[in-house]
Image (cartoon, rainbow, N blue to C red):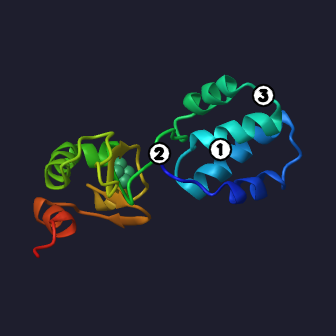
Amino acid sequence: MVEIDKELLRDMLSRYQGRGSDLIPLLLEVQAQFSYLPEEAIQLIADFLDMPEGEIYSVSSFYSQFRLTPVGRQLVAVCRGTACHVRGASRILGEISEEIGVAEGETSDDMEYTLESVACIGCCALAPCIKVNNDVHGEMTAQKVEELFAAPVN
Ligand code: FES
């Protein structure tokens, strides 16, 4: 299990009033901080809001932007929007998956990569596009995939 900073979490909670309407803003803030919703955070939020943990899990599973599992240091998002799709997004996804050894929706054992496909990321003119953390890479080709993800030679 990934260690999380409980002090930081308590600090976050202290800025809220403990009302039910705090749930979504709290989940968003926790996820922005940890990149996912750690189990301990959900427990603390449940106590703070006096709400069953199950209810928080239901809410977090309902909204697709919430993650309940940790992500790798490099979050690789392949755009599957229409423009990218027609320009070979599936092929690019397959090539990245092969290069980093991670299937779509999975995270590598060493927590280096998470690979996922996402809706349009707003750079359709550069299709096919991917995002690695906050960096967009457009006009992706097999060669660019290799340049971005090839394992360093020791
Ligand atoms: S469809 Fe991929 S960036 Fe818009």
Q: Is residue 86 left or right of residue 111?
A: left
Numbered mark located on residue 1 in the image = 2
The image quarter containing residue 128 is bottom left
Residue pictured at 30% horizontal, 62% vertical? 126
Res. 87 mark = none
Marks 1 and 2, Cα distance to the nearest angstrom?
Answer: 13 Å
Q: Is residue 11 visible?
A: yes
Residue 25 on image: x %, y %: 73, 46
Q: Nearer the viewer, mark 3 or mark 2?
A: 2
Residue drawn at (58%, 28%) of the image: 62
Residue nearest the observer in this picture, 87 or 48: 48
Residue at disc 2, secondary structure? loop
Q: Which mark is residue 41?
A: 1
Q: Earlier in the sequence, mark 3 or mark 2?
A: 2
Q: Tell me if label 1 and label 2 are in contact, CB under 8 Å.
A: no
State the separation of the CA atoms marked 3 and 2: 24 Å
